[in-house]
Image: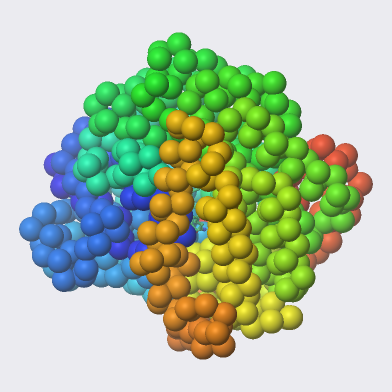
């Protein structure tokens, strides 16, 4: 039976990580699927959480002597993942090196051009495809039968081959993640000082926002039985001492009935006393479910992150902004009344950003009074409709900086250093006032503890200068904004094989976008996706190709 080693690459960027060390859910979901299929010789190395450098990793891989090494990558961690697999092939030349995750799924031509040592890229959800791959290896059918395995890409000599896309995992309830593969004492959520988990209730999102990669990745929307999810949470609490979780879902509240069942089940089993949780969701769902907010809170939901102002910032639609702004404010008020912490997320840094628009986001944040506010840099995921439409306006192809904290686009009205400085100014003003006038005085017990815990996470990252990678880029306040260096690697360019696809895509996207904007203007306001966007979904027949 093949020995399989899964590795989470050691990539850091000072954003969401400041809240703690988070467990890599992909490894648990894949290990569970492998074990269920009878492949139980699986090991996992979390090089990110344990900050393992290449030399140590190389020794660890050699000691593990795997037959198959699998790494994951989102866009910014792609070079680290390629390097992990290069190291694996160096120390264990007979092992097969495979890569999965959102970036390689869409950018397999780019990845196989820059990292030809990779034996296979798994495109899309990994559970079923990985089992197929491991079975082929175990039965000695790899590489002879590789063209028969759906959802992979590989090099056949100098030719890049992609087999037809595999179906999505249709029966999510059959997923059985093996959480025991993780070293739980490492995964602590700083605001509460407890162990944290990331279970998955639903996959997919019915919306198609033009800047987002997630709807394209998961394709159709599927949801697990709430009872089964609560079973999993109960096990996480009982067996691994988890005290906080976030749902990995894109929009967990979309299915109102199932989400309500989930909340009721948590309450029925007495779990809210033992575990608190958080979600990302949409303002419109909060408005729709305002009567249910007390139930959500009773079920232990304490933190809601809202994509509040993405739409206005994207400036891609012409809707009546005032209405949206009012809705955002109202949603935050409703959540506050229900004693749920709110986090407002702003996306900034498109080419049309100005000092005035950044100031406007600060004023909104202060006016709405969420507990937390985030200003993420717009990041043009290279497989999204908006990227394809932006075309030549994207000048930086160093994907390691595609991380929500580095300005990839240069606004017409300012340089990147000024953009970073103005974003930091918003953070400084917002959190200084919160720290002085709100957090220490708002409520008692849990609310106060949580808010001060969040402040502690911010302060820790601020002192260590990891927040927004400020230490790495050399930002020490407004006086340094002209000296900031983002260290973009200009040698990183788009591979020829990938470019061919993009040229055709760009023209198509511009045409589609114009039509989409027209259609949106005509549509009912309530039926609009949170951030505007196209209508594209990847079909199972898509993405099958051979390129030279
Ligand atoms: C939880 C989370 C985090 C956690 C990380 C947890 C961890 N250690 O993995 C924290 C909060 C730390 C975090 C940080 C960041 N995140 Co984050 N995060 C998420 C979130 C909400 C859930 C991820 C998850 O666990 N999903 C569930 C698992 C099961 O799905 P999965 O990882 O995709 O794995 C499946 C497949 O991809 C595939 N697969 C994946 N790997 C492999 C490997 C092999 C070998 C195979 C065969 C298959 C395979 O199979 C898996 C099962 O089907 C996603 C959004 C989302 N809903 O997915 C964003 C998301 C992944 N994050 C994102 C980003 C940008 C970041 C940051 C850069 C932001 C920042 N600056 O802070 C950092 C980077 C940290 C890092 N070094 O990786 C982006 C990535 C976008 C992109 N196109 O690259 C996402 C998609 C959010 C978004 N809105 O766009 N994140
Ligand atoms: S609502 Fe938009 S931004 Fe949110 S996951 Fe869906 S497509 Fe992405």
Q: Relative to 361, does residue 369 appear above or below in the rendering?
A: above
Where residue 391 sits in the image (x, y, percent)? 68, 74
Q: What's the colour scheme? A: rainbow
Inspect this view and state whether residue 528 appears: yes
Q: Residue at x 88, y 39 (%)?
A: 524
Visible in this render: residue 171?
no
Q: Which residue does the image show at 21% across and 70% down from the upper left?
A: 54
The outermost residue toward the bottom is 483
Residue 531 in the image: x percent, y percent?
A: 72, 51
Instruction: Tell me what residue is drawn at x 71 percent, y 67 percent.
Output: 358
**Foreground: 351 or 192?**
192
**Residue 512, horizontal then vertical, whole percent:** 78, 59
Q: Position of residue 7 (x, y in %)?
A: 26, 55
**Residue 449 sits in which quadrant?**
top left
Q: Residue furthest right?
A: 522
In the image, residue 192 above or below residue 487:
above
- Relative to 128, is 350 above or below? below
Q: Count the marks.
A: 0
Residue 429 placement: quadrant:
bottom right
Q: Quadrant of the N terminus?
A: top left
| 457 or 186, nearer to the observer | 457
Question: Going by the image, does 435 lie left or right of 503?
Answer: left
* Residue 107 shown left or right of residue 430 in the figure: left
Hey, which residue is sitting farthest top in the picture? Answer: 268
Which sits in the foreground, 324 or 128?
324
Residue depicted at 45% across the width and 32% down the height: 446
Q: In this orientation, which residue lies closer to the viewer: 334 or 219?
A: 334
């Amino acid at each position: 039976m093949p020995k399989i080693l899964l590795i989470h690459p050691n990539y850091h960027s000072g954003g969401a990580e400041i809240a703690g060390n988070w467990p890599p859910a992909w490894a648990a979901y894949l290990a569970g699927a492998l074990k269920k299929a009878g492949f139980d010789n699986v090991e996992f190395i979390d090089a990110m959480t344990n900050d393992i450098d290449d030399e140590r990793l190389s020794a660890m891989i050699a000691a593990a002597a795997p037959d198959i090494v699998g790494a994951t990558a989102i866009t910014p961690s792609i070079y680290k993942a390629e390097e992990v697999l290069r190291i694996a092939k160096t120390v264990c030349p007979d092992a097969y090196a495979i890569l999965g995750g959102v970036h390689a799924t869409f950018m397999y031509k780019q990845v196989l051009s820059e990292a030809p040592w990779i034996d296979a890229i798994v495109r899309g959800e990994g559970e079923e495809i990985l089992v197929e791959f491991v079975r082929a290896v175990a039965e000695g059918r790899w590489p002879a039968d590789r063209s028969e395995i759906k959802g992979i890409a590989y090099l056949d000599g100098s030719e890049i081959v992609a087999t037809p896309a595999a179906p999505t995992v249709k029966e999510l309830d059959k997923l059985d993640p093996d959480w025991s593969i993780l070293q739980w004492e490492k995964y602590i959520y700083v605001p509460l000082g407890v162990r944290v988990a990331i279970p998955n209730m639903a996959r997919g999102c019915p919306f198609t926002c033009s800047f987002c990669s997630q709807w394209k990745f998961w394709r159709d929307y599927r949801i697990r039985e709430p009872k089964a999810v609560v079973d999993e949470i109960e096990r996480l609490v009982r067996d691994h001492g988890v005290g906080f979780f976030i749902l990995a879902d894109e929009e967990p509240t979309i299915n109102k009935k199932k989400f309500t069942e989930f909340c009721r089940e948590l309450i029925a089993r007495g779990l809210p006393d033992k575990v608190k949780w958080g979600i990302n969701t949409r303002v419109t769902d909060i408005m729709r479910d305002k009567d249910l907010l007390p139930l959500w809170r009773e079920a232990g939901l304490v933190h809601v992150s809202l994509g509040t102002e993405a739409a206005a910032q994207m400036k891609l639609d012409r809707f009546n902004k005032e209405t949206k702004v009012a809705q955002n404010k109202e949603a935050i008020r409703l959540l506050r009344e229900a004693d749920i912490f709110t986090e407002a997320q702003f996306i900034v840094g498109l080419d049309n950003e100005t000092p005035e628009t950044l100031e406007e986001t600060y004023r909104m944040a202060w006016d709405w009074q969420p507990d937390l506010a985030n200003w993420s840099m717009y990041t043009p995921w290279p497989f999204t409709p908006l990227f394809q439409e932006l075309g030549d306006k994207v000048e930086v192809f160093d994907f390691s900086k595609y991380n929500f904290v580095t300005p990839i686009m240069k606004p017409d009205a300012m340089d990147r250093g000024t953009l970073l400085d103005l974003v930091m100014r918003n953070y400084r003003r917002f959190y200084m006032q919160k720290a002085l006038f709100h957090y220490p005085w708002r409520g008692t017990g849990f609310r106060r503890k949580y808010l001060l815990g969040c402040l502690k996470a911010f302060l820790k990252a601020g002192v260590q200068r990891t927040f927004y990678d400020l230490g790495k880029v050399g930002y020490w306040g407004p006086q340094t904004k002209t000296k900031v260096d983002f260290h973009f690697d200009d040698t990183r360019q788009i591979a020829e094989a990938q470019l061919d696809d993009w040229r055709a895509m760009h023209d198509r996207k511009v045409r589609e976008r114009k039509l989409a904007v027209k259609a949106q203007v005509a549509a009912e306001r309530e039926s609009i996706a949170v951030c505007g966007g196209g209508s594209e979904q990847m079909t199972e027949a898509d993405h099958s190709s051979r390129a030279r």
